[in-house]
Image: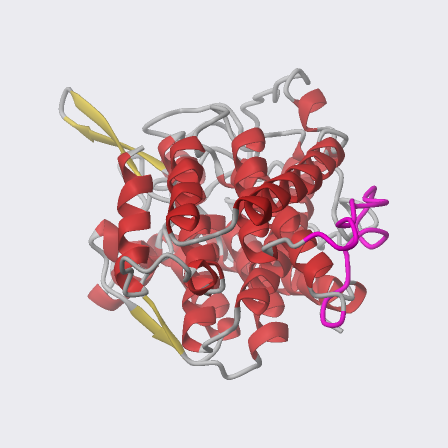
Amino acid sequence: MRLAFIAVAALCFAIACTEKKNDYKQITSDPFLYSKTVKELNNVVMQNNFPPIIASRNYVYANIAAYEVIAAGNPQQYQSLAGQLNGLTTVPAPAAGLEIDFNFASILAFCQLGEAVTFPEGSMKDYVDSLKKLVKDHGMPGKVFRNTVAYADSVGKSILAWSKKDNYAQTRTASKYAVLDSPGRWIPTPPMYAQALEPHWREIRTMVMDSANQFTPPPPPKFDITNKQSKYYQEVMAVKNAGDSLTDEQKHIAEFWDDLGNRLNVSGHIMFMTKKFSPPGHWMNIVGIAAQKAKSDYATTVYAYTKTAIAMFDAFIQCWDEKFRSNYARPETVINKYIDQNWVPYLQTPPFPEYTCGHSTVSSASAEALTSVFGDNFAYTDTSELEFGIKNRSFTSFRQAAEENNWARFYGGIHFHNSCLVSTEHGKKVGILVNQRLKMKK
């Protein structure tokens, strides 16, 4: 909760908050406020240990709620997603003649969905209360405040009702993944030996894709560890050899894109967890960095976050559909069993099948969405990992960042490089589909 007040204090400082009582529009029109709010949800997601696929659900509904408010307030520039996203038929329109601060309403709608979709409910309440106090203290008239809160609530309830029909609740009670220790098949990996994460995610309603298997990748190389000429054996040895001779630069690349939300650290008899944001949280940060560099206005900033969140959401469904079709073993499992029982990957292996790579899939989908907003060859420096003690990396484009992620998973020893390449190709297809089908900015 303390983070909420720190965030607001930082915002006030950034916009030269004074004792003036009629400058609330200066606050609510600043796109930095929206980015700070997304980061606040990012912190909630991280602290509550949400895995990446569930995190993508948190971000997508919150951003869509915000976007719908912005589209309603800017009908000449933006178009509602109603009738464009699967199952979303209508969103409440504002009553004619009412004065509404649509920017502030978008934040309230975002937080309303963040609270409702993210457990525990109410986790953003202190943050919202502090923002409400801020705008009141800076002169937002009572009538405008009430109209704004009421409209945000109506949009939030509409998006929440739609979200509850995405089959998420039903997958909470679905059957567990059956672990079969057969050659080449995924089994839990050390040190956590956790069960497979979200084996029924393919059953979640997509946003834009026609179905989870719309972009089915080719089967991975057939398991064949005894034939040294086989594609499979060569892929396995490439991971081992790379892991045994990593340079400092390669280690930095692996660490920068690690984004393992919960890492179990083991030292002798001592075990403890460290937390980071997951891949969707990382890409949400990148959206904020890009929007700030481009000096995007408030509406464009919300638009960029929303399109990226939609692309990531569908990309995860596409990826998880394949993961639990092929049930492919991780490099660590195969190397330990057949080559070197003491080998350990540089990064900790996450608990789900190897093929295809989730991070590579959502990174390439995000890169396509962001390129459609900010253009290709958009150079930026990613500062996302500084809070975890990892130095920045700079990129010439979003696509270059996504391509580097391929190598990161390979250097980390948690994915075969072939998987990363296939994942990038198919994540890109998802991103292109989102760009082609969604008519958002007029």
| On-image quarter of the C terminus | bottom right
Coloration mode: secondary structure
Q: Is residue 94 magenta?
A: yes
**In which quarter of the view is residue 362 placed?**
bottom right
Q: Is residue 36 magenta?
A: no
Is any atom of residue 184 visible in this view?
A: no
Instruction: Say which of 136 and 350 sits in front.
Output: 136
**In which quarter of the view is residue 174 placed?**
top right
Q: Quick one: which residue is furthest to the bottom in this view?
A: 377
Taking 427 as reference, is 335 left or right?
Answer: left
Which residue appears at 36% of the width and 51% of the height?
Answer: 258
- Picture coordinates of residue 77 (x, y %)? 72, 72
Can you say whether 186 is above or below 389 in the image? above
Can you say whether 396 is above or below 13 in the image? below
- Picture coordinates of residue 411 (x, y %)? 36, 58
Which residue appears at 74% of the width and 37% of the height?
Answer: 158
Taking 277 as reference, is 77 left or right?
Answer: right
| On-image quarter of the N terminus | top left
Instruction: Say which of 213 and 91 sits in front.
Output: 91
- Picture coordinates of residue 336 (x, y %)? 36, 36
Taking 276 as reference, is 298 left or right?
Answer: right
Instruction: Say which of 359 and 184 sits in front.
Output: 359
User: Number of numbered discs present?
Assistant: 0
**In which quarter of the view is residue 327 placed?**
top right
- Picture coordinates of residue 124 (x, y %)? 44, 34
Of helix, strand and loop, which mostly describes the magenta segment? loop
Is any atom of residue 399 visible in this view?
A: yes
Image: magenta residue range? 76-98
